Amino acid sequence: MKKYFRFEELGTNYRREFLGGMTTFLAMAYILVVNPAILTLADVTDFPDALRMDHGAVFVATAISAAVGSIIMGLIGKYPLALAPGLGLNAFFAYTVVLVNGSPWQHALAAVFISGVFFLLLTLTGLREKLINAIPVELKHAVGAGIGLFITFIGFQNSGIIVNNDATLVGLGNLTDGNTLLAIFGLLVTVIFMSRGIKGGVFYGMIITVIVGMIFQLIDIPEKVVDKAPSLAPTFGALFSSFGDSSFYTTTMLGIILTFLFVDFFDNAGTLVAVANQAGFVKDNKLPRAGRALISDSIATITGSVLGTSTVTSFIESSAGVAAGARTGFASLVTAGFFIISIFFFPLLAIVTPAVTAPALIIVGVLMVSSLGKIDWTKFEVAVPAFLTMIAMPLSYSIATGIAVGFIFYPITMIVKGRIKEIHPIMYFFFVIFILYFIFLK
């Protein structure tokens, strides 16, 4: 096992990989609660129950699809990168496709399935890997930094430190709130651990935050430890009924499929590049085993749609595991194991509150913006697209949108500067695609 995952070469061990894998799981365990709530439109009171997805089935589908994707990533891609149904795409699935367009959730699952199959074909031909490797190194660093800012913003939001403000869009929250104070405490503890160079400091910070939260009754002690796993029957294979329904074959559904394709590709590519950069895997602007890594999310998306969940993609929270010491695919196997166990130990997930995970997300952002130092800010033609890529992600609340903005400006500034020969031909393709993205898909 050590030889297969190159422990010695990468300077790691079982303990670091286990802590890293567990930290990644804890950082993204919220998806097991959030994804079923979104896909079942739990916050929409006037939606007919007969048209909702089954909550228990979606929960199991979420856990299994995350485990499958993470296992494939660990064994084939050998990256410490975990997968699960992506936020944003699940909201598009539920609120746009099902609620606004009025499409049955079975049709939405079929659209996800088709996008997954198409992605798998693109990956097997090597096209997805070529597209990622064609991205200039400066923009790759900007993507990593932008995702760092984005995930930090999410951490501040989840903690209540930053809240909505009608006058200024965002503002400082109520710092006397118990959960916000707990998150601030967790951040302080984690900063102390990390500053002291303690391996697994992010994980230990989360554990101490949970204990303190229980002491001050901000986190409920679970009444149960183990519970019966819900049935997967209500959603398993339900998508295949759509292919015999003539109402499925519409131009609207084609646009939905393209949206799933587009957003998943660039969200996944951005996350993969960012985490790989953080772990030090990118060499000479090339991502080793990129094709193998990309296969995992394609298969996971196909598997997830058959089970009953929206698009599965790489999770940026994996960077929390990397920060805790994970360097190999073994950490992904550990994360997958926890997802499988979580099906039966769901009551324990109640202790992983936003106040617990927020400090980890904020610290990860600190680590990820270090890639800004690798960008030559003295060259304006590079600085503009890099900055816009970085800043647009948190401001638009979308990794894909941030990439789109930067990739549109890159060929423009490079051409004006007279560096046209340095532009990879694929970047012109991206330029056109992103223009169309803003015109039609957005």
Image (cartoon, rainbow, N blue to C red):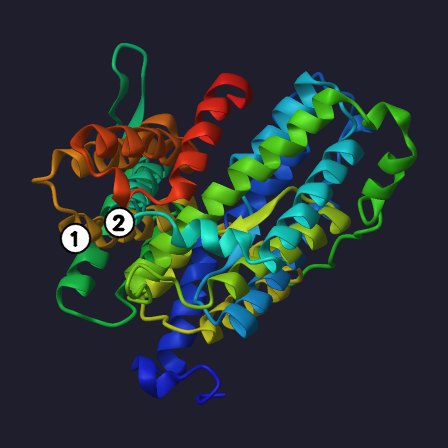
Residue at 45 percent across and 28 percent down: it is: 432
- Residue 243 relative to residue 190: left or right: right
The residue indicated by pointer 1 is 374
Of all residues, the one furthest to the top in this rendering is 167
Element at label 1: helix
> Is the residue marked by circle 2 packed among few (<14), some (14-19), or many (20+) residues within 10 Å?
many
Q: Quadrant of residue 272?
A: bottom left
441 shown above or below 267: above
- Residue 348 relative to residue 399: left or right: right
| Residue 141, numbered circle | 2
**Residue 128 versus residue 172: which sits nearer the camera?**
128
Say whether disc 2 or disc 1 marks the residue closer to the N-terminus.
2
Q: Quadrant of residue 300?
A: bottom right
> Is the residue marked by circle 1 packed among few (<14), some (14-19), or many (20+) residues within 10 Å?
few
Residue at 64 percent across and 41 percent down: it is: 36
Q: Position of residue 93 (x, y in %)?
A: 64, 32
Amino acid under disc 2: His
| Residue 163, numbered circle | none
Q: For the residues labelled 2 and 1, say whether their Cβ atoms are less than 8 Å apart.
A: yes
Q: Position of residue 342 (x, y in %)?
A: 60, 61
Q: Position of residue 157 (x, y in %)?
A: 34, 34
**Residue 238 versus residue 358: which sits nearer the camera?**
238
Q: Quadrant of residue 53?
A: top right
- Residue 324 relative to residue 111: left or right: left
Amino acid under disc 1: Lys
Is any part of residue 283 visible from this angle?
A: yes
18 shown above or below 31: below
